[in-house]
Image (spheres, rainbow, N blue to C red):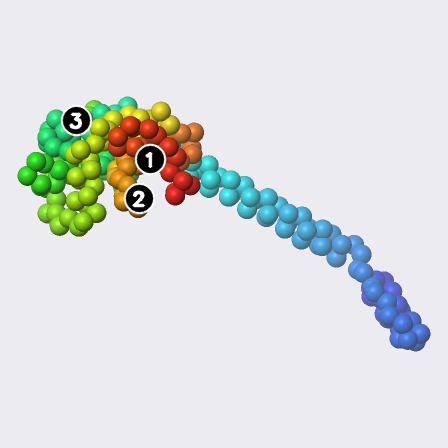
Amino acid sequence: MKRNIVIATLTAAALATGGTVAAFAAGDDGATATQRQTGTSAQSAADRDDDSADDRDDDASDDRTAVRSGGVTAAEAIAAALKHTPGTALSADLDDDGADAWEVNVVKGDGSEYDVRVAPDSGKVLGAQRDTDEDQDADDRAELAAVKGARTDAREAALAAAAKGTVTEVGLDDDHGTVTWTADTVKGGKHGEWKIALDSGKVTQDRDED
């Protein structure tokens, strides 16, 4: 009641003198403002913590993807696939859709393509399925021709890229007419993307994907 009287008195005085007055409520209103400010700061800090947690979860997920290989590297998966299905390996990908297997794409001598699945823990071939969609465009034919005449195959490219981290994928890329091997790696929660020359096996960072 006293606070209301004081505010009313100040307002009346301001009207009488033609001036203005700013009345700030004390006590509970001040505490409420402080609480609002503190709550906002706490919420911002919580949001930052959530973002950091999300980043950590993403990094942990990446590490788990790499660890799921169970010691079977990309190079070993390619070797196992080629032993089961002889031909030319064009790619190897550590499948992370819940199936937990390496998928190695192999082209046989007659041009037929197979997806060979290799267990990431034992290196055992789980099966090979023929790719019924074998329509190759000009780029596909150029890549296949380049690989057949290359000094570095998919397994050797995977071995070369392994010096940069755990290889989770290796394949081919036609960059303005120059065909190279490409590889994705994970190391310390960070991704790396690399190019491996078909002739020399030299590894360079993939600047196009940096």
Percent coordinates x, y for residue 192 in the rendering: 39, 35
- Earlier residue among tags 3 and 2: 3
The numbered dot on residue 80 is: 3
Mark 1 closeness class: few <14, some 14–19, many ≥20 residues within 10 Å: many
Query: Disc 1 residue type?
Result: Lys
Task: Residue at 31%, 32% (x, y): give it.
Answer: 196
Q: Quadrant of the C terminus?
A: top left
Which residue is the extreme one toward the left?
110
Name the quadrant containing residue 102: top left
Percent coordinates x, y for residue 190 in the rendering: 42, 34
Residue 128 appearing in the image: yes
User: How far separated are the C-alphas under marks 3 and 2?
Assistant: 29 Å
Percent coordinates x, y for residue 151 in the rendering: 22, 28
User: How far separated are the C-alphas under marks 1 and 3?
Assistant: 23 Å
| Foreground disc of the pair 3, 2 | 2
- Earlier residue among tags 1 and 3: 3
Q: Which residue is mark 2?
A: 175
Task: Residue at 29%, 32% (x, y): give it.
Answer: 197
| Nearer to me, 101 or 26 | 101
Q: Are the residues flagged by discs 2 and 1 in contact, CB closer than 8 Å?
A: yes
Q: Are the residues flagged by discs 3 and 2 in contact, CB closer than 8 Å?
A: no
Task: Residue at 15%, 36% (x, y): give it.
Answer: 106
User: How far separated are the C-alphas under marks 2 and 1?
Assistant: 10 Å
Percent coordinates x, y for residue 17 in the rendering: 93, 74
Left or right: residue 195 versus residue 133 is right
